[in-house]
Image: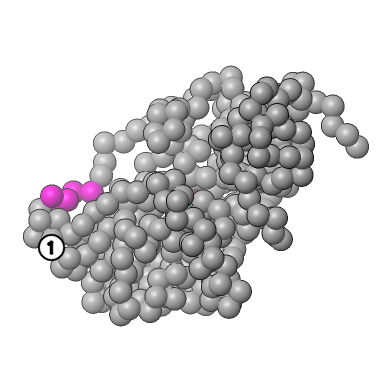
Amino acid sequence: MTATTNRQVLLVEKPTGKLGPEHFKMSESAIPEPKDGEALLRVRYISLDAANRAWMHGATYRAAVETNTVMAGGGIAEVISSKAPGLVAGDIVFGDTGWQNFAAVPAKQLSKMPKLEPMTHLLSVYGIAGLTAYFGLLDVGKPKAGETVVVSAAAGSVGSIVGQIAKIKGCRVVGIAGGKDKCHWLTSELGFDAAVDYKDGNLFKALKAAAPDGIDVYFDNVGGEILEACLAQMNLRGRIGCCGAISQYDGAPQATGPRGVPGLIVVKRLIMQGFIVMDYMNQRDAALAELQSWVAAGQLKVQEDVIDGLENTPAALIGLLAGENRGKRMIRV
Ligand code: NDP
């Protein structure tokens, strides 16, 4: 059946507390006409990212999302028609398509993607998640064989790949995740050496037991109390890769944060560095080749959490922030 209208999810209100379904609304509009320099896209998969929620607070590495507009979000899409050089009907692209069936997007804001199966891997291991894990761990964390690497949100899309790459590099790997099931999955399926359930009591003590020799590299996806516990257990000349701060995204902006940061950094000669994956795009091809070789060799398992239906996008994001997902969550449009 040929679609005649464009179904869209609008952000109708910015949350001041926790994100809820009432902040979104389904809407319909005409399928857009691409202008010069744009391509008309049919969206195939929409990426659910913790950062979607952070964009509602204000400008970050991108502009804030505004109310009564289509909710922003990355997606894999097929070019239907093009008024831009370099793109033709049938091409597969990644870009900020937003939460909708069709989008007209300037070609310069799109990345042409290889045609590979399953296409979902273009959002997970060969997408932003895989590249974030790859560059954040290897370039910022600089792990050496034998060192202890700790990663938070370890059962999520970025974290599950970070831990597996650290194993490939010969490190002892500890994942921090919410719940016994996720922790068991990390050790039994993904090869982590230990996992800590941050929802189960004394995080500091549990981390000490899981990483008895201290932490050399901490890949921080969550900030807050987990960052504080890891900071206190860092070894001399340890590295902390600051990837994100999920614990601070959903709710009113908080004034909490790790205590004792400056003193610890000085005394332990720590390096604490933030990074944005987009800064590494000139090295993308080499990273993808290495990720592909690990997947082909069975060293890197890809976990995807695919939910059907554009109308389920708000619930899927709310659920991701609550820890429902294992691996890369996305919507099949
Ligand atoms: P994930 O797939 O990792 O899912 C988010 C997970 O975070 C949930 O499953 C949940 O798992 C965990 N979580 C939620 N709330 C808390 C909390 N309060 N404390 C600890 N864990 C929590 O999401 P993403 O892959 O989208 O994001 C991972 C991180 O990577 C984010 O910080 C994101 O901003 C960052 N990122 C950064 C990029 C960069 O360029 N710097 C690029 C892409 C992502 P659990 O059950 O374990 O609680």
Q: Using the rendered image of the protein, determine whether residue 211 is visible from the camera's viewpoint.
A: yes
Q: Position of residue 274 (x, y in %)?
A: 31, 48
Q: Residue at x 70, y 55 (%)?
A: 115
Q: Is residue 152 above or below residue 148?
A: above
327 horizontally vs 118: left or right = left
Q: Residue at x 8, y 60 (%)?
A: 267
State the extent of the magenta-drawn residues as a range.
258-262
Residue 219 placement: quadrant = bottom left
Q: Which residue occupies the foreground of this view, 145 or 16? A: 145
Residue 172 placement: quadrant = bottom left
Q: Main secondary structure of the magenta part?
A: loop
91 horizontally vs 328: left or right = right
52 horizontally vs 331: left or right = left
Q: Secondary structure at mark 1?
A: loop
Q: Which residue occupies the foreground of this view, 36 or 184? A: 36
282 horizontally vs 101: left or right = left
